[in-house]
Image: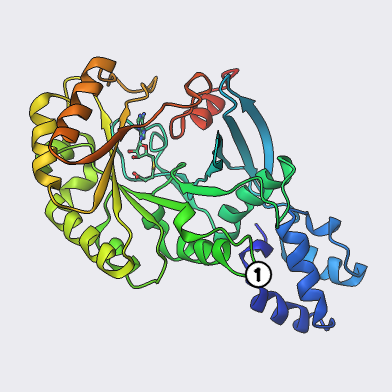
Amino acid sequence: MKAILQDCSLLELSRLVADAGEKPFRAGQLAEGLLQGKRISEIPVPAALKAYLLERFEEEPVRIERVFTAADGTKKYLFALADGNLVEGVLMKYRYGNTQCVSTQVGCRMGCTFCASTLGGLVRNLTAGEILSQILAVNRAEGGTPKARAVTNVVLMGSGEPFDNYDRVVKFLRLLTAEDGLRVSARNISLSTCGLVPQMRAFCGEGIALNLTVSLHGVTDEERARIMPVAKAYRIADILQACGEYFAATGRRYIFEYSLIAGENSDERHALALAELLRGRPCHVNLIRLNAVKERRLRAADERMAQRFLQILKSRGISATIRRSMGSDIGGACGQLRAGYLRGEDV
Ligand code: SAH
């Protein structure tokens, strides 16, 4: 594969343009074209510069391969990368704007037992520009512009573990929030991690105040480890400590995701233990009823159990909501679309 032009900041584009022997203002033209989601050949710069770039960079690092629209308006995108790998993304439409979910890796090596993204292991990391290009492509397809974006909010909750691809993800966040970029405010970005404590700690020093989200899914290290192998490496106590450090550094409350799985983590005693664990912390809990994955045996807790779980948390002063499941008719959960497509199913 060639390099990815969308990896470049405006400063890096300026250096590139200078190396190509072109006038400095061409960097601005390139940046503008890229922000509009254009392919290199579509950007109005001199033919010599285009040829210079096309020799070194991918013409279109992320191409929309297929789009599926759910009854509720949620759109699921299947993206083809330049090397033929596939990743997926979702666009959810809310009253306050549109939230796009992006992937950070092809596959994942965290091995959570309920998740479809990790079924084939990690294939490769995405570059910053490949993550950004998912948004550029959808923004363009939805009729947005760099100024009037069709994508207002971004969540790093597609396939992959963002903190297992730390440097590229941080670079992506800088490009996404840059004054001369799409200018998505950090408070409109959520990053979800399965709890890689050293990277959570390092992230406190990056000066990016986003919504830090941690996939908890269990109340003790032992119970967590049954469904999340990463729990053998990092303890809940250390995760909570790192969350506290992030709050101290940014002033942003943090969020826990808790997928309710029947017979596993969704009984009353789990709700009570979770309330105890989180008491007094500046956090919010997102309860999600498990999206059953074909390849996995686990089942979702029923609606009544989910409501009961929510009431227990709330009655003990924990801020919590049940996340509306969107687009479940189109394989909305992590990695389901790619998994189906790779099986050759007509999804
Ligand atoms: N690797 C990151 C990002 C994935 S985000 C992380 O683990 O946080 C996606 C969220 O959906 C995570 O909380 C993940 O645990 C959860 N998830 C994955 N598969 C799911 C499923 N089948 N049903 C419900 N939630 C699921």
* Image vertical order of residue 23 relative to residue 301, above or below: below
**336 left or right of 213?**
right
**145 left or right of 252?**
right
Instruction: In this rendered view, identify the residue nearer to me: 346 or 217.
Output: 217
Q: Amino acid at mark 1?
A: Asp
**44 left or right of 92?**
right
Q: Position of residue 168 (x, y in %)?
A: 48, 63
Q: Residues within 10 Å of mark 1 (few under 14, many from 20)?
A: some
Per the image, the residue denoted by label 1 is 180
Q: Position of residue 97 (x, y in %)?
A: 57, 42
Indicate if the residue with disc 1 has its beta carbon within 8 Å of ligand 1: no
Q: Position of residue 180 (x, y in %)?
A: 65, 70
Judging from the image, what secondary structure is the residue with disc 1 in? Answer: loop
For the N terminus, which image quadrant?
A: bottom right
Instruction: In this rendered view, identify the residue nearer to me: 45 or 289.
Output: 289
Looking at the image, which residue is at 22% across and 34% down?
A: 227
When asked about the image quadrant of residue 53, the answer is: bottom right
